[in-house]
Image (tube, rainbow, N blue to C red):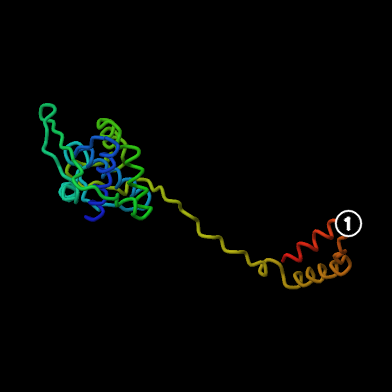
Amino acid sequence: MNEPIVHDICYSLLSRAARDKIAIGTTKLVKLFYLIDCEYYRRHGKTLTEAPWIFYHYGPYAEELVTVAHKTFGVGAQDKEEFEEKKFFRGYQIQSWRSDPIEKAHFSIRGAVDAVYQNWAGVDLELVLDHVYFETPPMLQAKRFEPLDFSLIPSGRLHCAPPEQARNFSNVIPANQRDALRAKLAASAARHPIARTPISVPVDESLQAALTEMGGRD
């Protein structure tokens, strides 16, 4: 797993959320990471975090990613709070403010992280879960406790067809016909030469004086 990028993404997501006054708990944080990997895979054919995602209980989960994310410098995980029976919320706080590392990252990384944050960070958790569980290709064919298959994500990359080879017209037009065509074109050019008549522009005294003055300045 790419631990440095996990740390950078974690700090970026949570510092932006703190700035925007958006509450992000562990469940949403994990799903944002997952959506970033989906988005990056769609664009580049590989996941960004390289986390070992599996279908765990109801959705995608990577325990190793959570462990690494909780070690991000400047981020503190709060104690769990039970808000409903057997339902818990663990929030985060920024303990040390610094510049957003994703702002200085390669545009391919920045693009995927920015897109997911803008589209999903402020969305109600239930809607995020609904999208993750029922609309992302790796989850549609997932089997419980088995690795998720990101190759099911349709590619969003632009595929440029290889340039078509230029046709070799020497193989299309016989040599004797090519020579005859060249001779015909040369004869036509000789009979109709291009006229090169000088253009006459009338210049009065005031214009002549102005041009002379401009020439003197140069």
Q: Is residue 204 left or right of residue 92?
A: right
Who is closer to the viewer here, 147 or 104? 104
Q: Quadrant of the C terminus?
A: bottom right
Question: Which residue reaches farthest top?
Answer: 84
In percent of width and height, residue 83 lies at 13, 28
Give the amino acid at mark 1. Answer: Asp
| Above or below, 178 relative to 72 | below
Q: Quadrant of residue 121?
A: top left
Q: Quadrant of residue 85?
A: top left
Circle 1 packing at 10 Å, graded few (<14), some (14-19), many (20+), is few
Q: Is residue 185 left or right of residue 66?
A: right
| Above or below, 68 relative to 182 | above
Instruction: Look at 88% across and 65% down and name the residue there.
Output: 192
Who is closer to the viewer here, 202 or 101? 202
Q: Secondary structure at mark 1?
A: loop
On the image, numbered disc 1 is attached to which residue?
Answer: 204
| Above or below, 87 relative to 183 | above
Who is closer to the viewer here, 6 or 209? 209
In percent of width and height, residue 137 lies at 31, 41
- Residue 1 in sight here: no
Who is closer to the viewer here, 183 or 47? 47
In percent of width and height, residue 116 lies at 33, 42
Q: Is residue 123 left or right of residue 67?
A: right
- Residue 119 in sight here: yes
Instruction: Look at 81% across and 67% down and name the residue there.
Output: 185
In percent of width and height, residue 77 lies at 15, 42
Q: Quadrant of the N terminus?
A: bottom left
